[in-house]
Image: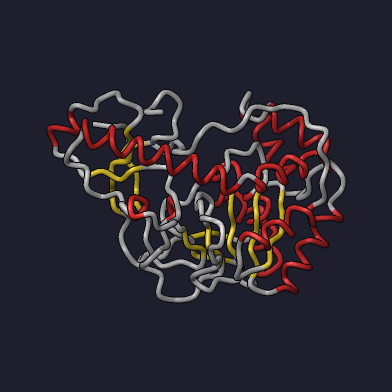
Amino acid sequence: MPRNSSDGVWGERKKYRFSLITATPDDVESLLIEKFFGGFPVVFSSGRGAMKLIVQEFWTSKEIPIFQYASQCVVEAIQAAAVTPYSRTDFTSEIIYNQWGELDMGCEKTPFIEDSCDTFLPEGSSVLQHGAQFEIWSLPKILHSRFGAIVWCRNNEHAKFLRKTRDISKRGVIKKQILRNFRNSSKWNYKTWQTSEFKTYKLSKFEYGTLLRDVSEWGKLYDERLKLIKKNSFLLNQKYSIYLEYRKDFESGIQVPLAPVFLLELSEEQLSALVGDTKFQVMHKIQSGNRPQKVTVYKFLQKGNFK
């Protein structure tokens, strides 16, 4: 049976390459406004830094309910804001997870934050579809960028406040760049880098230039992901004909959010044949108001899989 772990399902981040292109956060945000509607964007260095600052500045209680099996970076970001995260027994939360690009259809009350870290929307889409005050995108998970996150704010005054707070945190940008490149070399480096993300929310003008290029190629990257999904869908159906779960909206030509995984329904015999195959993984599918459900996913963005 595939391993049950918390390994990521996203593609490999782009390799570091020095760029002479420079930009401002305003440049990136203006481009996002052209491509999406329904909110006011703010560019951050990372999703965890954005989460920490939002909870710190806009959540008024000492505790906040979050979704089951929230990633460690979400938990630690909330704790860095001096707020205690916990999970309710009825599986509802103020921070919901639009997991793998699918809206959390179990959400019946307006949440505080929509964690849409891996929601790859087509251009022209609306954001904040559950009516939350904030929505967070992770550009490394969506565009395979090396860094960067987008916070969509429902209130323009909130967006202005976040931009002002981000831009006054000028110290430590270069240090953070260095730490980012070595964060996985040791636990100490990782913790030191994460602490820097909780203190300095902005990027350098060259890093904003890199993000401007990535965002400008949004439509191209969406089309490339769609082609990869179609190819994997064909190959996966040939090998595992009983795969049932993945939506086939993309085959109709309708533009939909693109997921980083295929959901599978496999027989026990098929599951037993997947022992040691790291392309498949048992994970928890999260939906508000419902007990997390174990599902088998095929991680087609992983290196060495169907290309």
Q: Is residue 217 left or right of residue 97?
A: right
> Between 119 and 182, which is closer to the camera in this rendering?
119
Q: Is residue 305 above or below residue 215?
A: above
Picture layout, residue 160 above or below residue 79: below
Give the residue at x 28% y 36%: 234
Please, is residue 192 above or below residue 246 in the view? above
Q: List x then y, in percent, for residue 98.
A: 45, 58
Quadrant occupied by the N terminus: top left
Q: Position of residue 214 (x, y in %)?
A: 66, 43
Quadrant position of residue 165? bottom right
Instruction: Answer with left or right where residue 12 lies relative to residue 201.
Output: left
Q: Quadrant of residue 162?
A: bottom right
The percent position of residue 262, horizontal first and vertical second, equals: 33, 43
Q: Residue at x 47, y 62 (%)?
A: 96
Q: Residue at x 71, y 36 (%)?
A: 192
Image-quadrant location for residue 126: bottom right
